[in-house]
Amino acid sequence: MDDLILETRGLTKEFRGFTAVHAVDLKIRRGTIHALIGPNGAGKTTVFNLLTKFLEPTTGRIIYDGHDITTARPAEIARRGMVRSFQISAVFPHLKVRDNVRVALQQKLDNSFRFWRSERILDSLNSRADALLEAVGLSGFEAALAVELPYGFKRALEIATTLA
């Protein structure tokens, strides 16, 4: 398996004597889709929180794209390309689709979350926003309000904002 994108070795998380995740070994190849299935309380969310660095493992290692990210900060692994989305949609429902992506893109301009920027400044983000929307299959929806999108399209919009 020389095309591994994600691997864990002995991944364990304990909370004050309670072991939520015990010695998980995963090997995920690039371009594949996997599911983590189990009953409530089985540790699925804890595994995702470990992989995305919302939690630190008690023991074990996490290797992403050939780099050991076990001690990396969440922002560092996000810059490497590993991000997550949540089950409940996290878009600005009353903003247009393109505007949702432009809000996320503002971080790179060092003016994050300054919603009242001039339209001229925000328009400079349009080509990148539109490219991200095209990448997730939302071309043609730039002017639609996010609240009007079907659920699957809202998820695609979340992916675009995460990539931004």
Image (cartoon, rainbow, N blue to C red):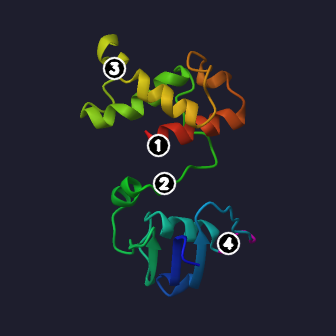
Q: Secondary structure at mark 4?
A: loop
Q: How many marks?
A: 4
What residue sits 70% from the left and 65% below the top? 35
Q: Which one is in front in this view, the residue at disc 2 or the one at disc 4?
A: 2
Pick whichever of labels 2 and 3 is earlier in the sequence. 2
Range covered by the magenta-colored residues: 38-42
Cα gap from disc 1 to disc 3, whole angstroms: 18 Å
Residue position for label 3: 124
Residue position for label 2: 83
Image height check: is 148 above or below 44?
above
Q: Amino acid at mark 1?
A: Leu
- In the rendering, which numbered label is found on residue 163? 1
What residue sits 31% from the left and 12% below the top? 120
What residue sits 73% from the left and 69% below the top? 37
- In the rendering, which numbered label is found on residue 62? none
Q: Position of residue 138 (x, y in %)?
A: 62, 28
Pick whichever of labels 4 and 3 is earlier in the sequence. 4
Cα gap from disc 2 to disc 4, whole angstroms: 23 Å
Q: Position of residue 162 (x, y in %)?
A: 48, 43
The C terminus lies in quadrant? top left
Examine the image and state in which quarter residue 91 appears: top right
Q: Amino acid at mark 2?
A: Val
Crowding near the residue tagged with mark 4, few <14, some 14–19, many ≥20 C-alpha atoms within 10 Å: few
Q: Position of residue 34 (x, y in %)?
A: 69, 65
Q: Secondary structure at mark 2?
A: loop
The main secondary structure of the magenta stretch is loop
